[in-house]
Amino acid sequence: MSYDCDVIVAGGGPAGSVAAAWLARAGHRVVLFERDRFPRFHIGESLLASVNDVLGAIGADELVREAGFPQKWGATFMTGDGRVERHADFSVAPGVRSPQTWQVPRATFDHLLLRHAAASGVDVRERHRVLDVVFDDDGVTATVQPLDDGQRPQTVRAQAIVDASGRGSLLSRKLDLRIDEPRLANLAVFSHYAGVPRPDGRRAGDIRIVAREDLGWFWLIPISDELMSVGVVLPRTAARALHGIEPGTLLERTIADTPAVATLLASARREWPVRVEKDFSFGSRAYAGDRWVLAGDAGSFLDPVFSTGVAIALESGLEAAQAVADGLAAGDLSVRRFRRFARRQRARYRSFRRFVLGFYTAEFRDLFFAEEPPRRMFRSLITVFAGYWRPTLATRIWVALFFLLVRSVASDLYGHAPPAVPQASATACLDDVDRLYAQLSARAVQPAPGGLEGGALGREWDLWTRRWEEEVARVSARCKLEGDSDPARRQLAAAVEGLEELRRDLSRSGESASAEARQVKDALAQARKLLGLKPR
Ligand SMILES: Cc1cc2nc3c(=O)[nH]c(=O)nc-3n(C[C@H](O)[C@H](O)[C@H](O)COP(=O)(O)OP(=O)(O)OC[C@H]3O[C@@H](n4cnc5c(N)ncnc54)[C@H](O)[C@@H]3O)c2cc1C
């Protein structure tokens, strides 16, 4: 069978450039089609710390460092009246390996990554639009339209395709995969301003997120020494009230009625047209199929409040490339090979989604801006804000506790400490952990679904997992096992840690799952013995 290349990549944004660069550096023949000529404008300037890992994996970290983008160490969240400021400094968060990241004018950043892909051996073809893709048993054929010189469409044949076409969503539209997010049908209006004051020192490069009373919010991102990207995002109900107003006037009006932003922009000059984006959030029924994977926005996109877009695009671009390379090596590019990729992509989206949905509720904001949020809990949230959506169990438990509090705390929390939970006895905790193990064992007979077609099954599994994790968090809060020196409680803490591993292993090899299950059972047996109870 003859192919023009091993892999076609559609789209030269962050997801496509990373996927293509990684595959080419691994020795594969890659053709990347990009419909625009770079550099081109793109929204999405604030990066997360997790992108450092991906840039390192494709050898682009030094290039980005040398580009001289403004340094970002975190985010500053402010209430609209400017009274409360929360600094989320990535360097204090557990598990964040390399906390300093960047604010990037995307025209420059994306161009740099695309050139890096070309330098890595990718055949980059700008001004080429992928019109359609057809699959057969042996490969994939793309029809591509060169956009200059009145050329005719060409066909290109490959073994697989990575769709990184952004919100254009080439395959997702063709295969009808999109899941709308009506709760996030928001409107964004933005521009660039000069003359906006910045804090001194390390906070100078922070993104500032300013919450509005109507549950909308502003971003202020320093994208160069002079310019600040400023935008407002309004939920659908708030946007409806401003319907019909010309975007420039809308932006000025929302700046004027958000005191913290009005103060910051008091002497600022607008240096750029006002642009609008709307209805930008959506999920996907599947992230991969036979000979195709979706990376970045081509699969799903989340409201930008936590600046997750480029981080997800880069990480999923890298993982898509690795999954395709594994498939090429195994001579099997069927959907089965991409199960893990798809599962991670869905989980990544859902982990951030719960934060995004939360941010549009008064309860989340009240707790988040409360005078003194428990420090360990706040740091755990920052780990996720830094892009680490799957942190350690301890961090996840703190995050789950935060969401439990959000649910239970009334919106007039300001200034009040969260209610203290009395510590349960070790015997009661043993019962709790035993119950968690029993629930998981019952689930083991119907392990995590791998079939991407089985969207309903996947959703059911995710829902169960979420509930189970909340239950783990509840038990951890009641039992306070972490750091306890009592030997029985230490065994129980080990059992809980093992349970989480076991839950993950259920969807992988049976061998590591049964080894993990043995360890959990041993820890529970030890705890039982230490408490003087009869063995089971
Ligand atoms: C209002 C707003 C604010 C945002 N702010 C942030 C932020 O602060 N931080 C952040 O990380 N993210 C932010 N984002 C999200 C960010 O813009 C995206 O998540 C990110 O650009 C996704 O990268 P990608 O590579 O998947 O897609 P893209 O960057 O969109 O790249 C896709 C590329 O594919 C090309 N293409 C499309 N169709 C075809 C085709 N048929 N053939 C060939 N080429 C094609 C396009 O020209 C484009 O260059 C924001 C988004 C919005 C809407």
Image: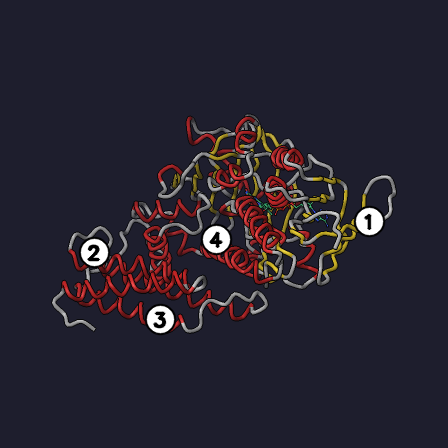
Q: Amino acid at mark 1?
A: Gln
Residue visible at 68% across and 44% down in the picture: 30
Q: Is residue 104 visible?
A: yes
Q: Quadrant of residue 511?
A: bottom left
Identify the element where label 4 is drawn.
helix
Q: Amino acid at mark 4?
A: Phe
Residue visible at 56% across and 69% down in the picture: 454
- The residue nearer to you, when weighing 354 against 60, is 60
Badge 2 density bin: few <14, some 14–19, many ≥20, Cα 10 Å = some
* Separation (CA) of disc 4 from disc 1: 39 Å
* Whole-percent x, y for residue 461 in the image: 46, 67
Q: Is residue 141 left or right of residue 66?
A: right
Residue 441, numbered label: 3
Q: Is residue 85 visible?
A: no
Residue 352, numbered label: 4
Ranked by sequence position, the earlier of labels 3 and 4 is: 4
- The residue nearer to you, when weighing 49 against 140, is 140
Residue at disc 1, CB closer than 8 Å to ligand 1: no
Residue visible at 40% across and 41% down in the picture: 96
Circle 1 sits on which residue?
A: 154
Ranked by sequence position, the earlier of labels 4 and 1 is: 1
Circle 2 sits on which residue?
A: 490
* Whole-percent x, y for residue 358 in the image: 45, 56
Relative vertical location of residue 256 with respect to residue 235 in this rendering, above or below: above
Marks 3/4 in contact by CB < 8 Å: the verdict is no
Residue at disc 4, CB closer than 8 Å to ligand 1: no
* Separation (CA) of disc 3 from disc 2: 22 Å
